[in-house]
Amino acid sequence: MAEAATGAVRVEKVRGRSALTRCFARYPLKLIAPSKVGPASCDAVWLYALTYGGGIVSGDTISCTVSVGDGCTAAITTQASTKVLLEQGSNWSLAEQMQEYNVIAMVVLLGPKLKSMQELMQAEVRKLMSGQLRPPTSGGSLYTMRSQPPPRPQRPPLIASCSPFGRTGTGMVARVAAVSTELVYSFLRHHLAALEPFLGASPYAAS
């Protein structure tokens, strides 16, 4: 028997505006709907997902269903970075699996209004990663290059990928891993700034 969801969210049009009509959460998940994030003229619902104790520990399972009605706008995020207690599940140590990367983030963009933003983000991430993962070139003659082993590419401080989903391609998942929290915040501030007209505020904007 499938385990019951730990959260359920529904956003629908009420009197012509996006409204939170259902907000359910149980341990280890908490959902907070702030009364005001952007200007009153902005038609968007904000939700913050939190966990008890500020992190996810062994045995915690989180499954949340989200339903956003036609013409509605919603943003679900966290107030800060969430700590996660990892387990040894293979012959490789956690340090070997994570390498230098200490922070992982995932962003889901869904809806036809965000199609151009998704395409721009995919193009920028593709350009970023193609430049960072390209092996460095060595100077000298062709014979000198052949006599030495090719240089190993250095691991970049931040890596990212974008994957579209959905039958009509209206969704995209961006995944980011970095050596520090500030690098991830900088990446998110830059790529999510275009959401401000829809949400009334830019996610992860510098205070």
Image (cartoon, rainbow, N blue to C red):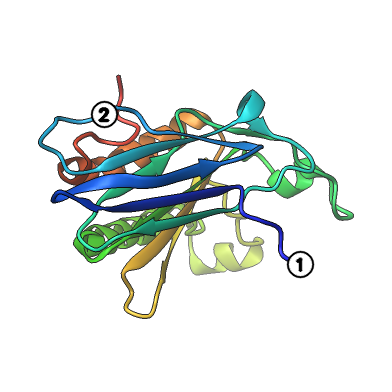
Residue located at (77% from left, 46% from top): 96
Q: Is residue 52 above or below residue 11?
A: above
Q: Toward the viewer: 189 or 8?
A: 8
Residue 56 in which image quadrant: top right
The residue that disc 1 covers is: 1
Depth check, front residue: 82 or 142: 82
User: What residue appears at the point 37 percent right and 61 percent down from the top-left corner?
Assistant: 126
Q: Percent x, y for residue 138?
A: 50, 55
Q: Which residue is mark 2?
A: 37
Count of numbered circles in the view: 2
- For the point 25% across and 27% down, the residue is 36
**Residue 48 at x, y percent in the picture:** 43, 35
The answer to whether residue 127 shows anywhere in this view is yes
Marks 2 and 1: which is nearer the front? 1
Q: Is residue 139 visible?
A: no
- Badge 2 crowding class, 10 Å Cα cut-off, few under 14, some 14 to 19, many 20 or more, is some
Helix, strand, or loop for circle 2? loop
- Classify the position of the N terminus by image quarter: bottom right
Residue 21 sits above or below residue 165 on the image: above
Q: Nearer the viewer, residue 197 or 157?
A: 197
Q: Residue furthest left?
A: 41
Give the structural element (helix, strand or loop) at label 1: loop
107 left or right of 150?
left
